[in-house]
Amino acid sequence: MTLSTVIAQNFSKEYWHKGEVYLFTEESIKGSIRYDLDQNNITIRTPDNKLRSYNASQVEQFWIEDELQKRVRYFYSLPQITKDDYRVLYFFELLTEGKITLLCRENFVVKQVGYYSPYMWGGWTNGGSYVVQEDDYFLLNNEGNVVDVEEDREAIMNLFGKKKDVMELYLIDHNNKLRNREDLLQMIRYYNEVYK
């Protein structure tokens, strides 16, 4: 017998959020917004209960009051160069802007849980699965292009160029391990504040 479970979780993309959409046609629409970054699509429910869907090629930007995360979030349609050298618009969340502008895209991954059981053939059994949100980070460079942020510490520190050594000291002084979104945000906000 195999025990299989799915652990229920809440993600912002599954909810309707109060917000506003700004289209490239210069039209703005207020209402309840539901977004899907995987599909680069948003749906807005207007006050008269009509549903309208838009993709990243139609939307310049939108904002939502995220009730789950208890903050206002800003998203922009920005071009990213594909492997075939095409410029395609994708939705990116703005995390912080300044000399270094940090962007993010949510990514959802299914994780499997296993455990050892001496009564199962091979000893291991499937304990179920669950979905986790793993954020992918990007920078907006001076040319207006979106570039991936490598996830290793050395690559992140290289973003600071000549100020790399100073930022290493900042990490030590603030016991910042660069392990999560808040660590990365704190460091980049500090850099943007000090080196305007």
Image: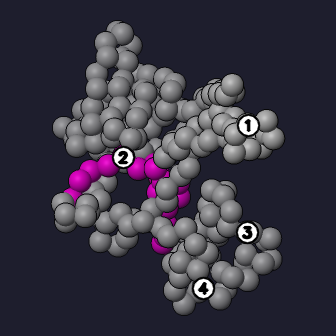
Q: Nearer the viewer, residue 139 or 179?
A: 179
Q: Earlier in the sequence, mark 2 or mark 1?
A: 2
Crowding near the residue tagged with mark 2, few <14, some 14–19, many ≥20 C-alpha atoms within 10 Å: many
Mark closer to the observer (3, 1): 1
Alpha carbon of mark 4 to alpha carbon of mark 2: how far?
30 Å
Alpha carbon of mark 2 to alpha carbon of mark 3: how far?
28 Å
Crowding near the residue tagged with mark 1, few <14, some 14–19, many ≥20 C-alpha atoms within 10 Å: few
Q: Position of residue 40 (x, y in %)?
A: 33, 40
Q: Position of residue 91 (x, y in %)?
A: 36, 46
Asked if the residue at tag 1 contacts the one at tag 3, i.e. Cβ–Cβ closer than 8 Å, the answer is no
What's the magenta region?
87-105
Alpha carbon of mark 3 to alpha carbon of mark 4: how far?
15 Å
Asked if the residue at tag 1 contacts the one at tag 4, i.e. Cβ–Cβ closer than 8 Å, the answer is no
Position of 142 with respect to 190 (left or right) is left
Q: Nearer the viewer, residue 43 or 154?
A: 154
Residue at image mark 1: 120
Which label is found at residue 177?
A: 3
Question: The disc labelled 2 sits on which kind of residue?
Answer: Phe
Residue at image mark 2: 91
Residue at image mark 4: 164
Mark closer to the observer (2, 1): 1
Question: The disc labelled 1 sits on which kind of residue?
Answer: Met
Crowding near the residue tagged with mark 3, few <14, some 14–19, many ≥20 C-alpha atoms within 10 Å: few
- Give yes or no for residue 93 being in the magenta stretch: yes
79 in relation to 54, above or below: below
Q: Position of residue 121 (x, y in %)?
A: 70, 40
Secondary structure under the numbered disc 3 in the rendered image: loop
Q: Position of residue 11 (x, y in %)?
A: 57, 33
Q: Residue at x 38, y 67 (%)?
A: 147
